[in-house]
Amino acid sequence: MSAQIPISTFKPYRGEKARLARAYDYLILVLALFLFIGSFHLHFALTVGDWDFWVDWKDRQWWPLVTPLIGITFPAAVQAVLWDKFRLPLGATLCVAALLLGTWVTRVFAYHYWNYFPINMVLPATMVPGALVLDTLLMLSNSLTITSIFGGGAFALLFYPTNWPIFGMFHQAVEYHNSQLTVADLFGFQYIRTGMPEYLRIIERGTLRTYGQYATPLAAFCSALLCSLMYPLWWYIGKWFANTSYLKKI
């Protein structure tokens, strides 16, 4: 008859395995966070670019149109994974918070301390309120259609009002050398960047300027329509990347 070993003998071993498993989970979470920060920040910098880099490029026409349209891409894809696989309604907020963290690190150390630009000139925009609404609508509705129509629209429409308390002071009119311009324009003329001054005021050109003071609402509603179409596209891209496939046993 074989001797039976008490179960208590294996408790320290099981505890060590559990501790290693938790450490492995924490490592995966940290790596996933850095993945969100790096990939979304690179995507945002290459597509939005100058509209988020400089305060004088945060204009009334292209800034509220381009930034939410590009900013909803990664949140939609991550929402598809976290909601479909884990039922966690925090994909958009997680992505935007990761982007904001990575952007602030870049602006402080690369732009401010390395290149000596004033931090007020390189302030990043925030999309946290729109991301919170996007996650909330997905949690309450559990519907891709409702989230894409109302959540995507709210993500774009909330962008300009929520950023106005941050950047509104830079749109104040000043007189400089007998010319009228904004504080943001004055920043742009005083701190020269690569390619100046050829592309400086291209951001204010376009047929939408014929609508005068209504350019910003029109750009915001146009962005809301495009975000409603962009959201389901990147939702299915996220589901495609998170798809699990198995090889058949021969």
Image (spheres, helix red, strand yellow):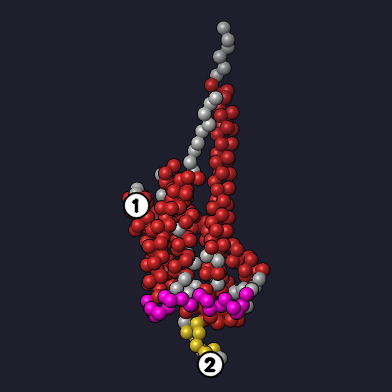
Q: Position of residue 90 (x, y in %)?
A: 44, 51
Near-viewer residue (58 or 243): 243
The structure residue drawn at horizontal position 50% and vertical position 82%, both measured from the top left corner, is 182
Mark 1 and mark 2 lie on one chain; the one further toward the N terminus is 1
Comparing marks 1 and 2, which lies closer to the viewer? 1
Residue holding disc 1: 145
Near-viewer residue (101 or 91): 91
Image side of residue 47 versus residue 165, left or right: right
Image side of residue 7 versus residue 147, left or right: right
* Residue 28 appears in view: yes
Q: Position of residue 77 (x, y in %)?
A: 46, 51
Per the model, the C-alpha gap separating discs 1 and 2 is: 53 Å
Residue holding disc 2: 178
The structure residue drawn at horizontal position 45% and vertical position 52%, both measured from the top left corner, is 234
Residue positioned most to the front? 207
Q: Amino acid at mark 2?
A: Asn
